[in-house]
Image (tube, helix red, strand yellow):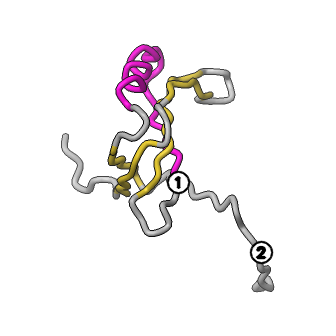
Amino acid sequence: APRLFADPQAEYTGTLLHRAEARTTLLDGAGHTVPVLCLDIELDNALRTHMHVEQPFPAGQHTQAEAAARRLTKGMRVTVQAPLVGLRLVAGNTTHIHTHPQEH
């Protein structure tokens, strides 16, 4: 059955900084793994921000993830879409962290 509301998606466009890679990541605490396609993109924005992207594949589809990685080469222009739910931002160059009084 079709869903009434689609998950909100973020969309980013840029240039691959290097060839994509197929890796394996842990799915859960029981040691189950899934293949994941990893790429790094220089985004089309004023600061040329870098973004790390991971696309999980179903368990047992490492061959498909490797085939996808071979198609994504350095310098290729790509657009990626990701649901806002689960999107994680990392500020690896934070210069200061301000604290705020706790409200009671």
Question: Residue 50 has which mark?
Answer: 1
Residue 102, quarter of picture: bottom right
Q: What element carries label 2?
A: loop
Indicate whether residue 75 is drawn in magenta. no
Which residue is painted at 72% across and 67% down in the image? 94
Question: In the picture provided, is 70 more to the left or to the right than 31?
Answer: left
Q: Residue 42's x, y, as percent? A: 47, 52
Mark 1 surroundings within 10 Å by alpha-carbon count, few (fewer than 14), some (14 through 19), many (20 or more) = some
Question: Residue 10 has which mark?
Answer: none
Magenta stretch in the rendered image: 50-72
Q: Residue 11's x, y, as percent? A: 35, 55
**Circle 2 is placed at which residue position?**
96
Question: How many numbered discs, if any?
Answer: 2
- Front one among 14 and 81: 14
Q: Which amino acid does label 2 sit on?
A: His
Q: Do the residues labelled 2 and 1 touch (CB within 8 Å)?
A: no
Q: Which amino acid does label 1 sit on?
A: His
